[in-house]
Amino acid sequence: NAGVTQTPKFRILKIGQSMTLQCTQDMNHNYMYWYRQDPGMGLKLIYYSVGAGITDKGEVPNGYNVSRSTTEDFPLRLELAAPSQTSVYFCASSYGPTTEAFFGQGTRLTVV
Amino acid sequence: DAKTTQPPSMDCAEGRAANLPCNHSTISGNEYVYWYRQIHSQGPQYIIHGLKNNETNEMASLIITEDRKSSTLILPHATLRDTAVYYCIVRVRNNAGNMLTFGGGTRLMVKP
């Protein structure tokens, strides 16, 4: 199993551009999550999903959108990128609500 | 939601036990305590979790006080590769999923 795979690993965006961060997992997990981590800080939940077709907002959803059309994939869309979205983005998945979460290696995004 | 309090940093000598404390005085009866760690900006890694009994696995032991207001993560023989930020997390229960909320964590430095 590859676990949780995120692409790209690094990206530089100009202000106002859009992009999609890809996340896929091969563990047949129902739950998937997107977090962001600013320098020197803990992780903050952006969006999460409890199954295909079901998504909900986390702590910091503004400026982002998600979709969950399949169990495996949970892409995060940034529309109109802003410097405040410069961060490291982590995708995670878990089988159930109390089981361990597996994290991807992150996408480092810089908006200039 | 129960909050956690951890010391911002700790040192430990290589080969010695590392004892990382966590206070969660407002924890409710059905909330679990989780520990994750993050090594140098990689994705967080699950270590262990528990409800009220002490738990042990191949990575660590988790000691939860009888009143559940605090816990200690024990790495029995710390190595240099255990240098990381350790997060103590109380799971926020809701109907939707496993909302892991990360605080600042403890930066553990294992020294030779």
Image (tube, rainbow, N blue to C red):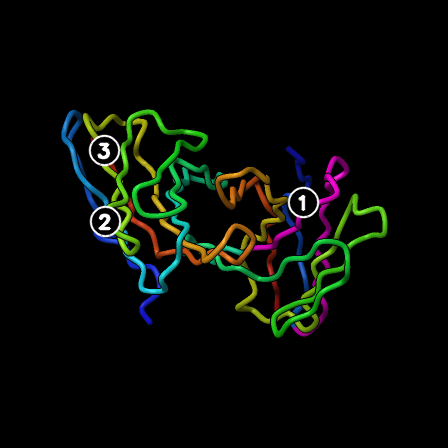
Residue A1 image position (x, y, % from top left): 33, 72
Picture layout, residue B20 above or below residue A48: below
The residue under label 2 is which amino acid type? Gln
Q: Residues within 10 Å of mark 3 (few under 14, many from 20)?
A: some
Q: Considering depth in this image, is A6 or A38 the residue closer to the camera?
A: A6
* Element type where label 2 sits in the image: strand
Residue A106 image position (x, y, % from top left): 33, 51
Residue A61 image position (x, y, % from top left): 36, 29
Q: Which numbered disc flags the more N-terminal residue, 3 or 2? A: 2
Q: Are marks 1 and 2 on the same chain?
A: no
Picture layout, residue A71 above or below residue A81: below
Q: Is residue B22 magenta?
A: yes
Looking at the rendered structure, which numbered label has been put on residue B31?
A: 1
Question: What chain does mark 1 sit on?
Answer: B
Q: Which residue occupies 30% across, 31% down?
A: A85
Picture layout, residue A32 above or below residue B3: below
The residue under label 1 is which amino acid type? Glu
* Element type where label 1 sits in the image: loop
Q: Nearer the viewer, mark 3 or mark 1?
A: 1
Q: Is residue B94 magenta?
A: no
Question: What chain does mark 2 sit on?
Answer: A
Q: Quadrant of residue A104?
A: bottom left
Q: CA distance from mark 1 to mark 2?
A: 32 Å
Looking at the rendered structure, which numbered label has been put on residue B16?
A: none
- Span highlighted in magenta in the image: B15-36
